[in-house]
Image (tube, rainbow, N blue to C red):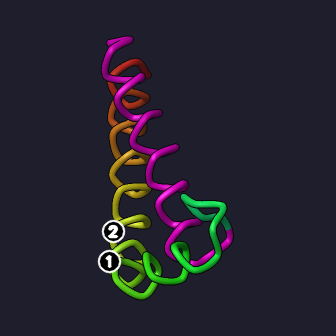
Amino acid sequence: MISAAIDGLISLVLGLWITLIGFKVTSLSDDQAKAEEFARKWGFLFKIAGPIIVLWGLYSLMRIYEKTA
């Protein structure tokens, strides 16, 4: 039960981080040129995958909540 909750939280946080990277709120590199190149190459995927991972994390946490209630 606790491991499933941790999995859900990890998915939620990771998805949020990926979403922020995709929308250029934060970047993986301090070098602006590298950050722009990464965003040009992977930005669209991160904009799509990030929210999906967030939804998966929320779904996982809600399933745990339903089992305990």
Q: Is residue 53 above or below residue 67?
A: below
Q: Is residue 7 above or below residue 31?
A: above
What secondary structure is marked by label 2? helix
Give yes or no for contact between labels 1 and 2 (Cβ–Cβ under 8 Å).
yes
* Point 60% across, 64% down: residue: 27
Instruction: Characterize the magenta stretch by its predominant secondary structure.
Output: helix
Q: Which class describes the residues within 10 Å of circle 2: few (<14), some (14-19), or many (20+)?
A: some
Bounds of the magenta span?
1-25
Quarter holding the N terminus?
A: top left
- From the viewer's side, name the closer residue of 15 and 1: 15
Magenta stretch holds residue 32? no
Front label number (1 vs 2): 1
Picture coordinates of residue 40, whole percent (x, y): 42, 88
Residue 19 appears left or right of 42: right
Picture coordinates of residue 55, whole percent (x, y): 40, 58
* Point 55% across, 73% down: residue: 35
Mark 1–mark 2 Cα distance, whole angstroms, equals 6 Å
- From the viewer's side, name the closer residue of 29 and 68: 29
Q: Is residue 11 above or below residue 38?
A: above
Identify the amino acid type marked 2: Ala
Residue 45 appears left or right of 15: left
Residue ID for mark 2: 49
The image quadrant that residue 10 belongs to is top left
The image quadrant that residue 65 belongs to is top left
* Point 34% across, 83% down: residue: 41
Picture coordinates of residue 52, whole percent (x, y): 34, 65
Quarter holding the C terminus?
A: top left
Magenta stretch holds residue 14? yes
Identify the amino acid type marked 1: Leu
Residue ID for mark 1: 45
Picture coordinates of residue 64, whole percent (x, y): 36, 27
Q: Which class describes the residues within 10 Å of circle 1: few (<14), some (14-19), or many (20+)?
A: few
